[in-house]
Image (cartoon, rainbow, N blue to C red):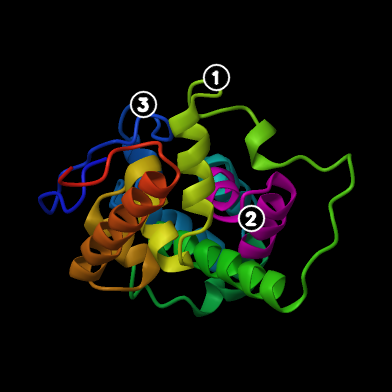
Amino acid sequence: MQVGPPPEDRSRISFLAKEGNLPDSERPDGPRDEEAQLLDECQAGNVSAFEHLYERHGPRMKSIAANLLGNLADAEDAVQDCFLKVYRGAASFRGASRLSTWIYRVLVNSCYDMLRKRRRYPVEARSEGETSVSSREPVTPAFDHPLRVSLEACVKDLEPRRRAAFLLFEVEGFTHREVGDILGVPEGTSKTLLFEARRELQRRLWKRGVVPRVGA
């Protein structure tokens, strides 16, 4: 695993990363005219506009939430919570950021809220009917490669902001500017968080005996 890459280098962790770049319609910097019109319709309370938002962003939001939370049931709850907040807050949204950026930011904050609740109120073991993220339709190769298994376990143990920066950049394919906008931090902070996440992952994977020690 490469630690401390050049600012916009994307090493693409092959066991987690999705293939290809995001289509323009799914990126925070997608077509502005279409998004501005969609915002106007949402602020006017047009239900079909919110349905279009869900169709456009829902699958990627569920993927992000599942990776951040590690559980599909929690991811679905986070996405629902996010869209409820978007529905309630659209009228007061003043466009300080792009609509899509704001939606992803609300989602990440919803995930943070769920992680904080987990720490305060440890949840009992989930029932057999609930599905964890490891058994969902994979976005990665469907085989239990030791590095993939170890990497996923180590990512779950990262501090939440580092985990978010790592997953948004390496797995979801956002740029540092987009990650910064979504997390509400400067672009440079996004780069720092990713560097720290990679360094921590390298250390954890080395302790597991999966990768050689840096400089060895």
Disc number placed over residue 143 in the picture, else none: 1
Q: How crowded is mark 3: few (under 14 residues within 10 Å), some or many (20 or more)?
A: few
190 vs 204: above or below: below
In the image, residue 68 lies at what x, y percent?
A: 54, 54
Task: Tell which tag, 2 or 3, sits nearer the viewer.
Answer: 3
Disc number placed over residue 19 in the picture, else none: 3
- Say which of 106 and 38 sits in front: 106
Question: Which quadrant, please, contains the C terminus?
Answer: top left
Based on the displayed image, in which of its 4 quarters is residue 59 positioned? top right
State whether residue 172 appears in this view.
no
Q: Element under label 3? A: loop
- Say which of 214 and 149 sits in front: 214
Main SS, magenta region, reads: helix
Q: Element under label 2? A: helix
Residue lying at 23% horizontally and 72% vertically, measured from the top left: 186
User: What residue did someone put label 2 on?
Assistant: 79
Q: What residue type is labelled 1?
A: Phe
Q: What residue type is labelled 3?
A: Glu
How far, Cα to Cα, is label 2 from label 3? 23 Å
Task: Tell which tag, 1 or 3, sits nearer the viewer.
Answer: 1
- First in sequence: mark 2 vs mark 3: 3
Q: What residue type is labelled 2?
A: Val
Q: Which region shows up in magenta?
A: 62-82
- First in sequence: mark 1 vs mark 2: 2
